């Protein structure tokens, strides 16, 4: 059954998503995607009137502000344009935005909670992290000591990809079970909170933990030419102002593999609609 989709805000992922939905024969109205020449460009009100409204991943780029290139659109203002009978889908919905919607009788479904999408996004992020690292390093990953902070979905996949390129990988976790899995993957294991005195050999550090992990005193123990890359939505590498540079590589799938990322979002949306 063909539907009318409103794709509002986001990055190139959402522009590619609009193209995929239109290619499947659906009617698609977009807002905030003109930068990528999105299909069905329309006004915010027209896009918000669609039967199924797809909001970005992540939903917000600031406190209470929609992740949208066209300008500041408060989520509270956007929600007032929507209706309770619509299907409203978004990624990484915060408790505040969920409450804003519920106060207006709206239900916002978080498509990023789908395991199939989270895994696909983690795979794209890991691949993008390797690509970004290789662009910023003046030497190969082969034989390099690399540190991966955190062993969730992204940490696991990134560790495997670095190992495949011949890097010597150390990964960190807090729970004994995760430390056991790190060793089972063939990596060296360290406790996330016990890094003091263990950092002097690393040529690259990749953080996946969305909370402070490395601060000034620990950063001082790393080699001066160590590449620092933060993949978390909240910075985990806290470099002092004016200190060593840190690449904050957020939303890599949207920048480096938007077509694959869009296909994963489309599939998750279809699964959600099929499960009505």
Image (spheres, helix red, strand yellow):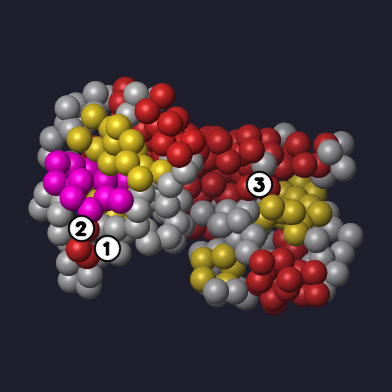
* Residue 27 left/right relative to 244: right
> Depth check: 114 or 156 in front?
156
* Residue drawn at the location 30% of the way across and 26% of the way down: 163
Mark 3: secondary structure: helix
- Indicate the quadrant where residue 148 lies: top left
Disc number for residue 215: 1
In the picture as drawn, the residue positioned furthest to the front comes out as: 176
* Residue 98 left/right relative to 226: right
Judge whether 108 appears above or below 75 on screen.
above
- Indicate the quadrant where residue 92 lies: bottom right
Can you give x and y, in whole percent of width and height, for residue 161 in the image?
36, 28
Residue occupied by mark 2: 219
Label 2 or label 3, whichever comes before in sequence order = 3
Dominant secondary structure of the residues highlighted in magenta in the image: loop
Can you give x and y, in whole percent of width and height, for residue 267 in the image?
68, 35
Q: Are marks 2 and 1 in contact (CB under 8 Å)?
A: yes
Q: Nearer the viewer, mark 3 or mark 1?
A: 1
| Badge 1 density bin: few <14, some 14–19, many ≥20, Cα 10 Å | few
What is the span of residues highlighted in magenta in the rendered image?
Answer: 194-206
* Residue drawn at the location 22% of the way across and 43% of the way down: 204
How far apart in space, not on screen, are marks 2 and 1 (Cα)?
A: 6 Å
Q: Which corner quadrant holds the C terminus?
A: top right
Whether residue 197 is in magenta: the answer is yes
Q: Is residue 65 in sight in this rendering?
A: yes
Residue occupied by mark 3: 113
* Residue 117 left/right relative to 78: left
Q: Which corner quadrant holds the N terminus?
A: top right
* Residue 85 left/right relative to 222: right
How far apart in space, not on screen, are marks 3 and 1 (Cα)?
A: 30 Å
């Amino acid at each position: 059954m063909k539907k009318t989709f409103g794709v509002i805000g986001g990055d190139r992922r959402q522009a590619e998503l609009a193209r995929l939905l239109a290619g499947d024969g659906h009617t698609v109205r977009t807002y905030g995607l003109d930068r990528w020449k999105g299909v069905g460009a329309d006004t915010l009100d027209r896009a918000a009137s669609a039967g199924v409204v797809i909001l970005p991943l992540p939903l917000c780029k600031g406190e209470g502000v929609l992740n949208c290139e066209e300008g500041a659109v408060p989520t509270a203002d956007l929600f007032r344009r929507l209706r309770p009978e619509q299907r409203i889908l978004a990624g990484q919905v915060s408790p505040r935005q969920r409450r804003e919607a519920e106060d207006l009788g709206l239900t916002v479904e978080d498509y990023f909670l789908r395991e199939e999408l989270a895994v696909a996004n983690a795979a794209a992020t890991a691949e993008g992290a390797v690509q970004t690292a290789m662009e910023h390093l003046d030497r190969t990953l082969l034989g390099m000591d690399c540190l991966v902070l955190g062993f969730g979905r992204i940490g696991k996949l990134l560790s495997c990809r670095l190992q495949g390129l011949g890097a010597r990988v150390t990964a960190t976790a807090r729970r004994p079970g995760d430390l056991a899995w790190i060793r089972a993957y063939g990596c060296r294991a360290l406790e996330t909170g016990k890094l003091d005195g263990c950092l002097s050999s690393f040529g690259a550090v990749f953080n996946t933990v969305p909370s402070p992990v490395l601060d000034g005193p620990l950063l001082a123990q790393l080699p001066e030419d160590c590449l620092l890359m933060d993949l978390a939505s909240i910075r985990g590498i806290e470099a002092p102002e004016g200190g060593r540079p840190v690449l904050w590589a957020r939303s890599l799938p949207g920048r480096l593999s938007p077509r694959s990322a869009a296909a994963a979002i489309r599939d998750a949306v279809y699964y959600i609609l099929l499960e009505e």
